[in-house]
Image (tube, helix red, strand yellow):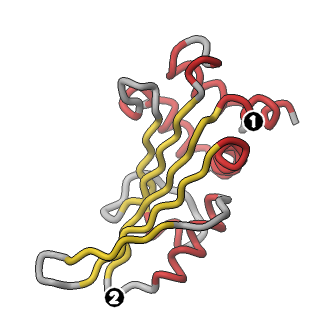
Amino acid sequence: MRIALCLASLIQSLEVSYLVHLTEDEGRIGSAVKETLGIDGTSTREELAGHFGNRIVHVVHRLTGVSASAAFEALARRLPPNVRKDILGRIEEMLDDHSTLYLRLDKQSLMQGEIALEGSEPVRVRVKPRLFLMKGGASGFFRSLLEGAA
């Protein structure tokens, strides 16, 4: 597949992070995130205290190189047409000054095996390209990758 070869050299890292509250099942959320977004490997977790002392766990999956590229390709292929169109329409808003793409996915939708943007409980996805290989600016770069995965 042409896009797989392209992505293998263009994505430097991908990071997925989310919070798990005391009333939620960390294993179930982790499995849903991994399966729906197509990520594998281990994660780091940090226990935090909420405003009222309740336990909150911050989970982070960090992928680099080929693993990051494969995960981004899997995510791009799984995007529903309406979500892809929304991202492509607002891509400039989702980029930072370092050409990193930031997506905020709805955790509840991921729990149901679906991908939707912007939830009250987001799963944050950060995609960092290999800048020295990127041509046409960040918005054009990510636009071509997302359109190519459709």
Q: Which residue is mark 2?
A: 23
Between circles 2 and 1, the one closer to the viewer is 1
Where, quadrant-wise, is the C terminus in this rendering? top right
Residues packed near mark 2 inside 10 Å, few (<14), some (14 to 19) or many (20 plus): few
- In 3D space, how far apart are the residues under numbered discs 2 and 1 (Cα atoms)? 38 Å
Asked if marks 2 and 1 touch (Cβ < 8 Å), the reply is no
Residues packed near mark 1 inside 10 Å, few (<14), some (14 to 19) or many (20 plus): some
* Residue 26 vs residue 89, the one in the foreground: 26
Secondary structure state at the residue bearing disc 1: helix
Q: For this view, does 77 lie left or right of residue 115? A: right
> At x 46% / y 32%, what residue is drawn?
100
> At x 47% / y 44%, what residue is drawn?
126
Say which label, 2 or 1, has the lower sequence index.
1
Q: Which residue is mark 1?
A: 8
* Residue 60 vs residue 1, the one in the foreground: 60
Q: Residue 39 in the image: state x and y as whole percent.
A: 65, 59
Callout 1 amino acid: Ala
> At x 60% / y 68%, what residue is drawn?
113
Residue 72, numbered label: none
Q: For this view, does 57 lie left or right of residue 113? A: left
* Residue 109 vs residue 138, the one in the foreground: 138
Where, quadrant-wise, is the N terminus in this rendering? top right
Q: For this view, does 118 lie left or right of residue 100? A: left
Q: Is residue 78 above or below residue 99?
A: below
> At x 55% / y 57%, what residue is drawn?
115
Q: Is residue 10 above or below residue 68?
A: above
Q: Residue 53 in the image: state x and y as whole percent.
A: 15, 84
Q: For this view, does 32 lie left or right of residue 8? A: left
> Which picture quadrant has residue 28?
bottom right
Secondary structure state at the residue bearing disc 2: loop
Callout 2 amino acid: Thr
